Amino acid sequence: MSASDTIVAAATATGRSALAVVRVDGPLASTIATAALRRQNALAGKTSTLGIWRGLDGEPIDQVVAVLWLAGRSFTGNDSLEITCHGNPLLVRRITEDCLARGGRLAEPGEFTRRSYLAGRIDLTQAEAVADLIHASSERALASARRMLAGELGRQVAQWTDRTLQILAELEAHIDFPEEDLPAEDPRGPLARLIEIASELNGYARTARHDGALREGLRVAVVGAPNAGKSSLLNVLTGADRAIVSPEAGTTRDYLEAPVAGLPMTVTAIDTAGLRTGGTTLENLGMARSLEQARGAHLLILVIDASAEPPALPAELLALLDPMRTLIVANKSDLPAHADQQNFLPHLTKISACLLDGRDAASLRTKLGEFLIAKEIAPGAEDLVVGVRHADALSRAAAALTEAADHLRPPIQTELAAARGREALDALGEIVGRIDNERMLDKLFASFCIGK
Ligand SMILES: Nc1nc2c(ncn2[C@@H]2O[C@H](COP(=O)(O)OP(=O)(O)OP(=O)(O)O)[C@@H](O)[C@H]2O)c(=O)[nH]1
Ligand SMILES: [Mg+2]
């Protein structure tokens, strides 16, 4: 894999579409374009060129728009060509093959982005963000990828690195002139500042717990006694008439899932069979499935009929009702509330609703979204969510800085502290890719699509 090769790949998904893009990157990009379009240097300096792309045999392939970015001004740092043709897979293949016949080779997954990284145009966090931006399936995932792509984590890392370097310089001075006192108690002294940086690093590392939720979305199991209105809630949340609703207790026998509409996160709601103590064999089978879904979900919504006596719920369900991940929807607010409901599971968050129709849909979605953020099940709009790779390096850097701080407490061992400080810098360097590791890069870029 050499940066002096000219690489070629379709950048758009296969299938029929209005337009498709083939990308060419490397020293031959300009010659390939001028030869295929029969222009003499006509592309250079232009924003775009409309022309007929001809194969090596001179036969026309398609009318295209070509854009050439010259080395130094492109995403990759090389001469880089984008050919927009009509979105027919046969045309995309012919143009790609023509570029290969003219001296290019097929790009590896992520190779364009890798080139950009190797040319120093973006750091590793931004390279990863390119893939995240493409795969993001919700507003919140997009927002986080966008901020990562804009270099937010990279700038943070640069700032932590500067502050750590400053402290290291002070420690080195102390190693050289040990008679000067290191004021360990001074709140602005090196010890306090090391601890401060470590705690900031840990704070960022903690956001990685939302990485899975951003990538795969959240599962919300709707549970409760028969006839409470679970299927009604699923229909209200999804904005579709998805589940059968009927006054007969035990309508839902199996679980069914559907996406919740109108939230910035991908959230899947799962309607389940009603849970009650002592049922028929068939009911028990359904209940076993309900409990299984409840155990695997990020959030439980317990639906209760607030107009009736509090339900007798099986102990297996009660054991799962953790206040950090259970929301009660007290349903049937259109009917007079039953007096005993007041004292039912008072330690859990309750919201009152009428699920007969969509009248409470907007407020339910808002409250659900707020609960997910308040209980840290989902990231807030302001959170930059770091990836698992970043979190691992951040935690190692934080641990090294904490150890460095420990060495500045009596008996003070400045040299050991400085050594730990340098370890922290190495870990921070891994995040942005300043410390190159060929195997890690191969693994990272292999998860990209071809053409990125
Ligand atoms: N008055 C009133 N009735 C409601 C409300 N929500 C649901 N219902 C009625 O309650 C009955 C049961 O609703 P479902 O949504 O089927 O309840 P469920 O919990 O899925 O029931 P099972 O699947 O049998 O466990 C239906 O007749 C609904 O029309 C409400 O807010 N007010
Ligand atoms: Mg139901």
Image: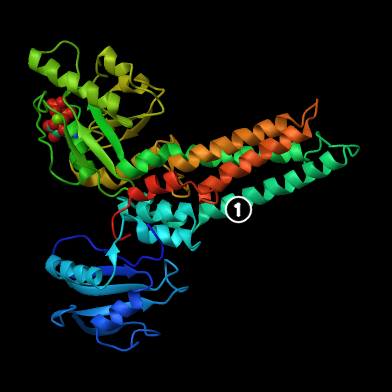
Q: Secondary structure at mark 1?
A: helix
Looking at the image, residue 439 sits to the left or right of residue 237; the answer is right
Q: Residues within 10 Å of mark 1 (few under 14, many from 20)?
A: some
Residue 264: tell me if it is visible: no
Q: Is residue 309 left or right of residue 256?
A: right
Q: How is the image coloured?
A: rainbow
Residue occupying the point 40% across, 36% down: 377
Figure quadrant of residue 427? top right
- Split into 4 quadrants, where in the image is the N terminus? bottom left
Residue position for label 1 = 158
The quadrant in which residue 419 appears is top right
Percent across and percent down for residue 404 are 69, 34
Please tell me which residue is depicted at 34% across the width and 74% down the height of the picture: 28
Residue visible at 74% across and 36% down? 191
Quick check: 245 left or right of 434?
A: left
Amino acid of disc 1: Ala
Q: Position of residue 236 (x, y in %)?
A: 21, 42
* Quadrant where the image shows the C terminus: bottom left
